[in-house]
Image: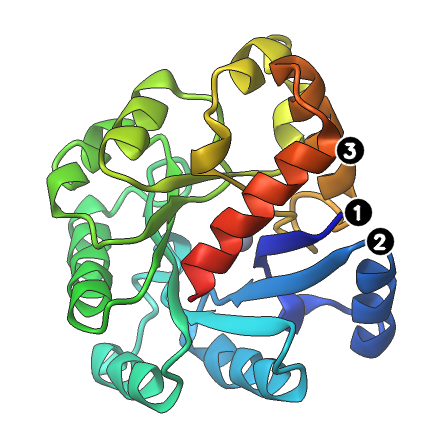
Amino acid sequence: MQFCDTHIHLQDIKTDLNEFIKTAKSLGINRFITVCATESDWKKAAAIAAAYPKSVTPAFAVHPWYTKQAQTDWEKRLEKMLNEYPKALIGECGFDLLKNQDLKTQAEVFDIHLQLAKKYHRPLLIHAVKAEMLLAAYWQKMPEKFIIHSFNGNGQILEKTIKYGGYVSLNAKILNKKNADEILRFIPAEHLLFESDAPYQTRVEDIIGLCKRIAAAQGKSVENLAQIVYANSIEVLK
Ligand SMILES: [Zn+2]
């Protein structure tokens, strides 16, 4: 089985990165999208992607926690990065009302990411915490490819993501929910991606257990589900 970790912060991994990637690969996790939270991450993510060109693809953005700290003209420098790295995605960006109450700045910053995703035809990796209502204004404006990262089981978000042709990205944290199997049963495999959000939310290897649990909930073989989800990630990366 092969897996792609579609949301990881490789530049924040504190252990030896070579070993880290080698171990992940030995478990079948052989592709990674390394996402950025602040501008200071961009060059680091780009360097890691350059060091592992077959395995790592970078995604550049300003995370909703850090919208206030974004330096003047960050959007111009982001655009420059996208030009410089034609395979790069855009993320993680979005809304977080739990940690940041400054909705106006978050909306301005998200809009810029959204416009750049459309202009450069790049997938958009979206962080949305306590933000279901806010996303309502954006579903119809989404770029060709978008991913709702760390999907928490919200039925409305799932419905809209399917309707507008996006993906929900799951990490093993969802298994802590009481009704996890109930949620997992109804997520169409064609709209599903796996992530760890390491080193923050889960470990890379947790993707495998998550895949098993979803396969069981949906009455599929693990191999079959893994294959569909891997194909989704290749489609996103293409
Ligand atoms: Zn993250």
Task: Rate crowding at label 1 as few (under 14), some (14 to 19) or many (20 or more) other CA atoms within 10 Å.
Answer: some
Q: Are marks 3 and 1 in contact (CB under 8 Å)?
A: yes
Percent across and percent down for residue 210 are 70, 32
> Can you tell me whether the CB of the residue at mark 1 lies under 8 Å from the nearest atom of ligand 1?
no
Q: What is the distance, in whole Å, between disc 2 and disc 1 at their CAs?
A: 7 Å
Q: Nearer the viewer, mark 2 or mark 1?
A: 2
Mark 1 or mark 2, which is nearer the start of the sequence? Answer: 2
> Can you tell me whether the CB of the residue at mark 3 lies under 8 Å from the nearest atom of ligand 1?
no
Percent across and percent down for residue 87 are 41, 77
Q: What is the distance, in whole Å, between disc 3 and disc 1 at their CAs?
A: 8 Å
In this orientation, which residue lies closer to the viewer: 226 or 60?
226
Q: Is residue 173 left or right of residue 137?
A: right
Q: Which residue is mark 3?
A: 209
Q: Is residue 47 left or right of residue 23?
A: left
In this orientation, which residue lies closer to the viewer: 110 or 148?
148
Mark 3 or mark 2, which is nearer the start of the sequence? Answer: 2
Q: Secondary structure at mark 1?
A: loop
Can residue 220 be seen here? The reply is yes
Is 46 above or below relative to 209?
below
Q: Which residue is mark 2?
A: 27
Tell me which amino acid carries mark 3. Answer: Gly
* Quadrant showing the C terminus: bottom left
Residue at horizontal 46 percent and vertical 44 percent from the top: 149
Task: Rate crowding at label 3 as few (under 14), some (14 to 19) or many (20 or more) other CA atoms within 10 Å.
Answer: few
Task: Rate crowding at label 2 as few (under 14), some (14 to 19) or many (20 or more) other CA atoms within 10 Å.
Answer: some
Tell me which amino acid carries mark 2. Answer: Leu
Residue at horizontal 12 percent and vertical 40 percent from the top: 140
Q: What is the distance, in whole Å, between disc 2 and disc 3 at their CAs?
A: 12 Å
* Residue 174 found in image quarter: top right
Q: Secondary structure at mark 3?
A: helix
Q: Which residue is mark 1?
A: 205
Q: Are marks 2 and 1 in contact (CB under 8 Å)?
A: yes
